[in-house]
Image (cartoon, rainbow, N blue to C red):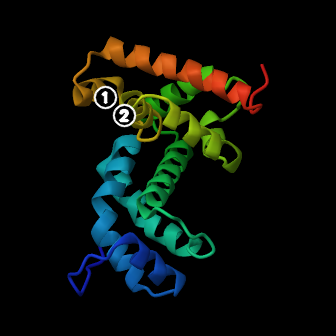
Amino acid sequence: MNRANPRGHTMDDKEIIALYLRRDEKALDYTAEKYDSYCYAIALRILGSEEDAKECVNDVLLAVWETIPPNHPEKLSQYLGRITKNISVNKLRAINAKKRGADYIRLCIDELSEAIPSADDPIALLESEELGGALERFLRSVSAANRRIFISRYYYLESISEIASRFGMNENQVKLRLYRTREKLRKYLWKEGLLNE
């Protein structure tokens, strides 16, 4: 995402999405200007390599261009974050990296498997349309602090130590909160009929 914005004007997300829907290539410039560092941070956290992260972020613009339309996201930042994470995870899997990020992915999948025991790929299941609404409702039902910790771990794939530092907690406190939230999630999904025990 190294395209320069010729106007020097930052557009809001609705205006940027409108440009995509009109197939106006300026949408790419505005997206790069506004979200380059955001997407890069996500990719770097997963891949653990600046070069791989830059390559991944360059792929994000193409993916967004190819998917809007037909998609019409309400929140561009969330849409870009999801695309960046998916591209990064796919790249990591494809090259079978033995990097720091690979350990995080495996660990996060193992942790989520505790909450979603019937899923072969719990991350993909959590992102599916069927569970999307249930997960959003569940996260609204937990405390704001637990919600932020859960999202930091399983969406942004942050390490326990990073989360502990950011929230002023020790690592054991973070682990305990994550464990309790996963247990609540498992029970919630079972109650909603989305898991078979």
Tell me the element at label 1. helix
Name the residue at 36% across, 19% down: 174
Vertical arrangement, residue 35 with respect to residue 141, above or below = below
Q: Around disc 1, counting alpha carbons within 10 Å, would you say few (fewer than 14), some (14 to 19), or many (20 or more)?
A: many
Residue 134 appears left or right of 93 = right
Residue 190 appears left or right of 93 = right
Name the disc covering residue 93, or none.
none
In which quadrant of the rendered image does the N terminus lie?
bottom left
In which quadrant of the rendered image does the C terminus lie?
top right
Is residue 80 something one can see in this rendering? yes
Q: Nearer the viewer, mark 1 or mark 2?
A: 1
Q: Which residue is mark 2?
A: 158
Tell me the element at label 2. loop
Name the residue at 57% across, 70% down: 72
Q: Mark 1 touching mark 2, by CB under 8 A? A: yes
Residue 127 appears left or right of 167 = right
Vertical arrangement, residue 168 with respect to residue 89, above or below = above
